[in-house]
Amino acid sequence: MSTTPSPWAPRPGYRRSSGLPQTSAGPSPLPGTGQRYQVHRESAPFAPAGQTGQQQAAPAWTRPGPHSARRTGELVARLVLASIGALLMIIVIWIASRSASDSSVLSAAILLAMIPLGLVLVVVYWIDRWEPEPLPTLIVAFLWGAGVATAISMLVNTTVLYAAAESTLSLEGAFQISAVVSAPLIEETTKGLGVLIIFLIWRRTFNGAIDGLVYASVVAAGFAFAENIGYFINYWDSITTIFIVRGVFSPFAHVTFTACTGLAIGMSSRRRSRAAWVWMTPIGLVCAIILHAIWNGVIASAGSPLVMFILVDLPVFAVCMGIVAWLRWAERMTMRNRLDDYARAGWFAPAEVQMLTTGGGRRAGKRWAATRGPQAVYAMNVFQKGAAELAQLRQQAVDGHAQADFSTKETELLDRITSARRTFIGAA
């Protein structure tokens, strides 16, 4: 772990002399602003190993007003995209329901489709638990996949299927063309477009490959959910087999494909060039299309679902989980490096950084807070979440992507963190 101070390292938050809580000798300027504040010191007796953390900074300042125009624009974008996605998802499910013999088949198909969806979302939650993405934006991602991407793909794939059937005079050949050529190209493009739109609108929420992976996974989960409903209805007579193939053997198939695009977009957010997504997104998209085409080709030739599961599903899933594990480790190290910047300036104790950047430490902190009551538990959650946001905010600055309101946001987060610390330390 590097100990080189970040070029964006915050100025000291308090005097490092020992003693009881006191005011520093003089006011210190807030990094990046002309504001000045007084700082105080507090103890932090919740270290997982029973240690007592060093005295902490506790600034007091006037919080600047929010950037209402940007937030209003983001709210409008969420409402518009979510509404379009929800409407198209309803239309897609309605079209699929026309093939159902009765309403019970539709209901059963939806319930069955929710099983692999739930599994995927649990894994996404596990991946994203260090610094969770905004729930409203994740809902937009899901509705884009289940509505927009599915509707466009269904329309184009059906058109290609009929065109290929007329030109080849072979329905089997038309299905092969649709599965290996049309489906990978159209489906990955529409899903990837959703991830890209989210990135361009809510760029400040992207802090690396993990975030791109999370949004891509949610888009793909929405797509697979709507697609599975259609498959389960159309093949209801063979529902056991089709559910095993799609719901048990390959629930992460679409997630794996679209993850290529998401990883590329997420990685572009860490590049110094703000236009890096222009050339990195196509690379990820091409990988997604190729992987999808190979997958569909293997399915068409494998014959046995069990053979496909052993030869394709398991190895691909193992590789993907290895990549995810490495990305989570890298994210944790990045978080530790950035919080170390603040620890050197006096905003965190070393024991706090250890607690905040390890799974065991975070759980220990929550267990300790639980012994002090509900208010302390809530404050500890705020403290941990705020520290993760603070680390990501500073990493954006280190990467050269500091927003105009960097200092304002940093001030708000430090205020929130120190207030939460006071609460769980003082809770009875």
Image: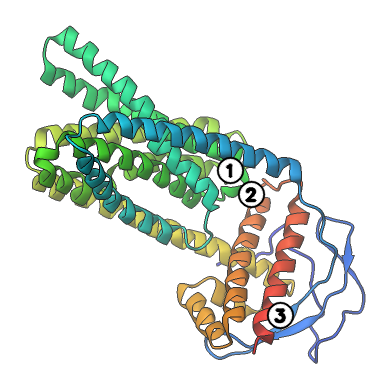
- Nearer to the camera, 327 or 421: 421
Residue drawn at (20%, 40%) of the image: 232
**Sequence-wise first label, 3 or 2:** 2
**Sequence-wise first label, 3 or 1:** 1
Q: Is residue 212 above or below residue 340?
A: above
Judge from the rendering whether residue 400 lies leftward or rightward of residue 135; answer left or right.
Answer: right
Determine which residue is flagged by label 3. Answer: 422
Quarter of the rendering occupied by the N terminus: bottom right
Numbered disc in front, either 3 or 1: 3
Gap between marks 3 and 2, in whole Å?
A: 32 Å
Q: Amino acid at mark 3?
A: Arg
Relative image position of residue 158 (x, y in whole percent): 27, 20
Relative image position of residue 281 (x, y in whole percent): 47, 34
Q: Are marks 2 and 1 in contact (CB under 8 Å)?
A: yes
Determine which residue is flagged by label 1. Answer: 271
Judge from the rendering whether residue 85 lies leftward or rightward of residue 112; answer left or right.
Answer: right
Q: Are marks 3 and 2 in contact (CB under 8 Å)?
A: no
Residue 146: quarter of image: top left
Relative image position of residue 257 (x, y in whole percent): 33, 40
Residue drawn at (68%, 67%) of the image: 341
Disc 2 secondary structure class:
loop
Q: Crowding near pointer 3: few (<14 within 10 Å), some, many (20+)?
A: some
Determine which residue is flagged by label 2. Answer: 399
